[in-house]
């Protein structure tokens, strides 16, 4: 690698060919990617949950997050209602946007699904 050192306005600068610069930049970006992957693996090992992109896309496309999480967990309306200690009709109404529900209901549903309340609240 050919490097030329120059001084400009009292600052010492290194000048190198563009190809060398781009190779260095690629190497730094690769190291950043490796560090991000290692950090993600540590979070995963510590219990952070990763969900399939399809699930995220469903919610971004406007599908009810409560329903998406319930289906992801493999639960029926009846099972979720039972685990949360609420009425099956309540869960159905929340999933269909026909009711908003009390905070305690959302907390119970989130606990049953092992997510935060923010994960299941409607976006609207």
Image (tube, rainbow, N blue to C red):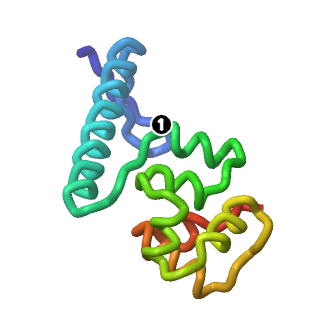
In the displayed structure image, the side of residue 113 where residue 59 appears, left or right: right
Which of the 4 quarters of the picture holds residue 124? Answer: bottom right
Side of 62 where 120 appears, left or right: left
Q: Within the image, what quadrant is residue 122 found in?
A: bottom right
For residue 109, above or below residue 19? below
Q: Residue at x 47, y 36 (%)?
A: 8
Work out whether 77 lies above or below 101: above
Give residue 120's position: percent from left, percent from top: 58, 65
From the viewer's side, name the closer residue of 97 and 20: 97
Q: Is residue 45 above or below residue 38?
A: below
Q: Is residue 108 above or below residue 21?
A: below
Q: Viewed as shown, does residue 120 lie left or right of 26?
A: right
Q: Nearer the viewer, residue 61 or 99?
A: 99
Taking the spot 69% from the left edge, 67% from the top edge, the residue there is: 94
Q: Quadrant of the N terminus?
A: top left
Q: Which residue is mark 1?
A: 8
Residue 50 in the image: state x and y as whole percent: 37, 50
Label 1 residue SS: strand
Which sits in the foreground, 45 or 22? Answer: 45
Residue 112 lies, in percent from the top left, at 43, 72
**What residue do we see at 71% from left, 48% from top?**
62
How many marks the image carries: the answer is 1
| Mark 1 crowd level (few <14, some 14–19, many ≥20, 10 Å Cα) | few
Residue at the image point whose x is 62% and y is 48% from the top: 59
């Amino acid at each position: 690698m050919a490097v030329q050192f120059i001084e400009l306005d009292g600052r010492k600068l290194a000048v190198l060919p563009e190809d060398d610069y781009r190779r260095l930049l690629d190497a730094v970006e690769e190291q950043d990617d490796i560090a991000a992957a290692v950090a993600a693996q540590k979070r995963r090992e510590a219990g952070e949950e990763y969900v399939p992109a399809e699930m995220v896309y469903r919610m971004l496309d406007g599908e009810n997050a409560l329903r998406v999480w319930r289906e992801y967990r493999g639960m029926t309306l009846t099972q979720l209602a039972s685990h949360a200690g609420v009425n099956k009709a309540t869960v159905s109404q929340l999933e269909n946007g026909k009711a908003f529900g009390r905070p305690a209901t959302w907390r119970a549903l989130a606990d049953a699904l092992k997510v935060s309340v923010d994960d299941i609240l409607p976006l609207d």
